[in-house]
Image (tube, rainbow, N blue to C red):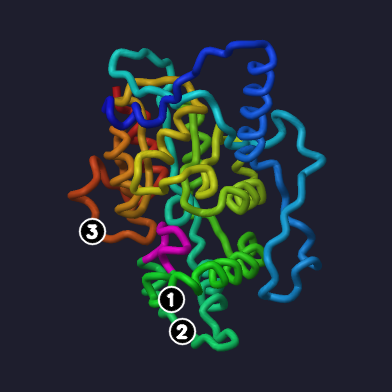
Amino acid sequence: MANIFGKFLGEKGNESSKKAAEQNSQNKSLQNDDLQDKFELAPQSVAQSSDEKIELKPDNDAKGGDKIIAHSTQGYAHLSSNATSEKKIILFDLDGTLLDSLEGIYASFCRACEEEEGKEAYAPSLEEVRSMIGLPLREMFLRVGFSQNEVESRVTRYKNHYRRICIEKSKLYPKVREALILAREFAHLGVVTTKTGLYSKQILENFELLKYFGVVIGIEDVSEPKPDAEPILRALSFLPIAPKQKVYMIGDTILDIESAKNAGVNALWVRCGYGQGLESQADKSFDTVYEAVAYIKEVR
């Protein structure tokens, strides 16, 4: 475990003067601002042309404490087997775990794969896209045969389409709300997803679920996505320190399970999503998120 956490811990050098200290503080502030996802999408009218780049603008109405955000901190939380914590920690994947978002993802992926000038189209099957959910978008487009040079334009087309339909085309799995209400009674909660954090927060807010989470970690908040340990460790850096036995990752794909194992936490698989036959890979398996949460509540 030491090697996993060691690479995330920064060293703080001695500052020789007050001026140097002030400059260092300013630099840290700028780094924090890069990760503080206080942005909202520009009005849809800005990008009615399907292939225009996504425009982001500062959310001038954002106030401290009003939004769940991911921002940089000094170092990462340690999972200590000797630590004591009154509450457990439960981290949830989003697509395929809390949300059935297949319809919107598939429609956007198909739109991004349409013919461009000088570039051939590709028609992915529903099952093909379903099997790739959980991977970063760039990896998904590479897997279906697009070149490195084409990937960025395809990702942009995907996002421009998805941002218009993501709320309409997303729905909660059964008893997700009840699961979160129950979980909040005995655990600190977070979301760890490979989806863009901005869209994730908008969708959660639409379902009035964002209030249940202490942190939402998206693809833009990490340098190495799942199955790397970083997204989970990143989320834990914003939550109270807990012994690793009390930390749980609930997800539907092998990427969630491997990320949990790489981070040294409990890996729970739910069958309601897009992964299949992962019982032997996970620590525990359940049909629904509610069943997983109910199990965690009873663990002593």
**Is residue 56 found left or right of 152 in the rendered image?**
right
Answer left or right for 257 relative to 38: left
Q: Quadrant of the N terminus?
A: top left
Query: Is 33 one of the magenta-colored residues?
Result: no
Along the line of sight, which residue is nearer the eye, 53 or 186? 53
Label 3 SS? loop
Tell whether 203 sits left or right of 194: right
Q: Magenta stretch: give its range.
A: 132-140
**136 within the magenta span:** yes
Q: What residue is shown at x 62% (from left), y 37% (from top)? A: 69
Q: Marks 1 and 2: in contact by CB < 8 Å? A: yes
Q: Around disc 3, counting alpha carbons within 10 Å, would you say few (fewer than 14), some (14 to 19), or many (20 or more)? A: few
Q: Are the two marked residues, 1 and 3, in contact with CB atoms closer than 8 angstroms? A: no
Provide residue 97's location: percent of width, then percent of height: 43, 51
Element type at mark 1: loop
Name the residue tied to disc 2: 122
Question: What's the residue at 54%, 72% (across, down)?
Answer: 154
According to the image, label 3 marks what residue? 277
Q: Please name the amino acid that badge 1 sits on.
A: Phe
Q: Position of residue 63 (x, y in %)?
A: 76, 32
Task: Work out whether residue 156 or residue 111 is closer to the camera in this orientation and state it.
Answer: 156
Where residue 299 sits in the image (x, y, percent)?
30, 27
Secondary structure under tag 2 reads loop
Distance, label 2 to label 3, CA atoms, is 29 Å
Q: Quadrant of the C terminus?
A: top left
How far apart in space, not on screen, are marks 1 and 3 (Cα)?
A: 29 Å
Q: Amino acid at mark 2?
A: Tyr
Q: Nearer the viewer, mark 1 or mark 3?
A: 1
In the picture of the structure, the residue carrying the numbered disc 1 is 146
